Amino acid sequence: MDPIIWLDLILVLAVLYILDRNLFHYVDLHLQNLGTTLSLQFHKRLLGVRLWLDRQAMVHRGPVGKLWNEYCLWKIRNNPAYKEFFEKRE
């Protein structure tokens, strides 16, 4: 890269720092927020898929809904907290 371009970039950053010192703090806060934003988007999509599957299981009794119901019942039956409800009594 041409050294004049580096000089121009440094000069622009210096002028920005002199005019508005909060700009660098603003950029820093946005970079810190990037992880939270990505995590939020991931969990939003994951929740959307779970809600779609629940809707398929409750409203549309197709193969996806039946499979999801079987999976949910299997999770409940194998949960140690609910073990006493599924034990056979004599």
Image (cartoon, helix red, strand yellow):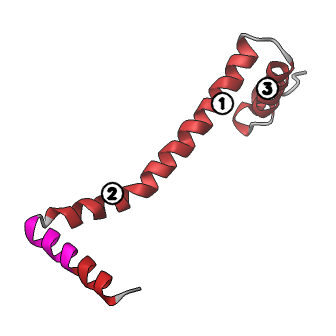
Q: Which residue is mark 2?
A: 30
Crowd class of label 2 (few under 14; some 14 to 19; many from 20; radius 10 Å): few
Residue at image point 33% right, 57% down: 30
Q: Residue furthest bottom?
A: 3
**Chain-order first, disc 2 or disc 1:** 2
Residue at image point 80% right, 36% down: 78
**Label of residue 50 in the image:** 1
**Chain-order first, disc 1 or disc 3:** 1
The C terminus, quarter of image: top right
Q: Which residues are magenta?
A: 11-19
3D distance between C-alphas at marks 3 and 2: 39 Å
Give left or right: position of 12 versus 87.
Answer: left
Position of residue 59 relative to residue 36, above or below, is above
Q: In what element is the residue under mark 1? A: helix
Q: Which residue is mark 3?
A: 68
Frontmost residue, 17 versus 40: 17
